Amino acid sequence: DAGVIQSPRHEVTEMGQEVTLRCKPISGHNSLFWYRQTMMRGLELLIYFNNNVPIDDSGMPEDRFSAKMPNASFSTLKIQPSEPRDSAVYFCASSFASRRASTDTQYFGPGTRLTVL
Amino acid sequence: AQTVTQSQPEMSVQEAETVTLSCTYDTSESDYYLFWYKQPPSRQMILVIRQEAYKQQNATENRFSVNFQKAAKSFSLKISDSQLGDAAMYFCAYRLPHGGGSEKLVFGKGTKLTVNP
């Protein structure tokens, strides 16, 4: 089975430009999570969806960030306009939400390393 | 708010020896999950082991085992017969079960494990 797929793997852009990160969750999973990893703040949740509906967006830094999940197999995280402080690794993870930890475990994609100059 | 603390920024171990990584957490919940994830230089987040709080028995996965002390809110990871491939950042994480609140993973800051040949 294919794991979580993220694209691009690396992105270098200039301040002020729009950046779109993409994620394809594991087939059959119904929850999707976006995390950000920085040296200063570690790994933090930005937003997560359950059955394509945003459930917790308390980690979204500000209005420059937006996320969508138009269907069960695709999600985007958009930053507009981008700033140097957005430079980080962005991870997407998916799970099958249930009451059983054996299935309700988050599996991560390879991440997108974003550099904003 | 739930917090996870890893007090050892770095650890080292000789190949074939045993090492224990520490993790403590703070929560007022009684039902939750705990995880250890491994992040090698490739930056892929890999699940190592998981523990459901209602289970008294400590989880084991081959050379990896945990010491879960619920009353002390402690969740340490023991790696036996350490191998060079175990060298990585290890993150302890906490989350609530599906239906119990936000399902985000709350991570510690990580412990960098070096394995010496």
Image (tube, coloured by chain):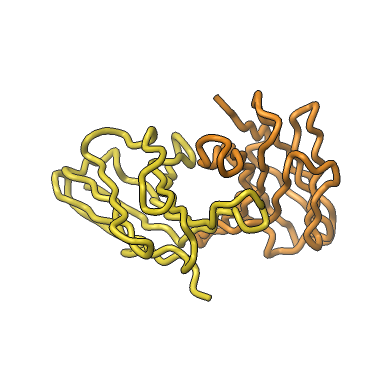
Chain colours: A yellow, B orange
> Compared to B34, does B115 lie above or below?
below
Q: Position of residue B104 (x, y in %)?
A: 51, 41
A7 with respect to A78 (left or right): right
Q: Total number of numbered labels?
A: 0
Residue B60 image-quadrant placement: bottom right
The residue depicted at 25 percent of the width and 44 percent of the height is A66
The residue depicted at 47 percent of the width and 66 percent of the height is A26
The residue depicted at 66 percent of the width and 51 percent of the height is A101
Given residues B77 and B30, the one toward you in this image is B30
Q: Residue furthest left?
A: A16
A33 with respect to B26 (left or right): left
Given residues B96 and B38, the one toward you in this image is B96
Q: Position of residue A115 (x, y in %)?
A: 29, 51
Q: Position of residue A73 (x, y in %)?
A: 37, 65
Residue A81 image-quadrant placement: top left
> Compared to B79, does A86 lie above or below?
above
The residue depicted at 45 percent of the width and 35 percent of the height is A41
Q: Position of residue B62 (x, y in %)?
A: 80, 63
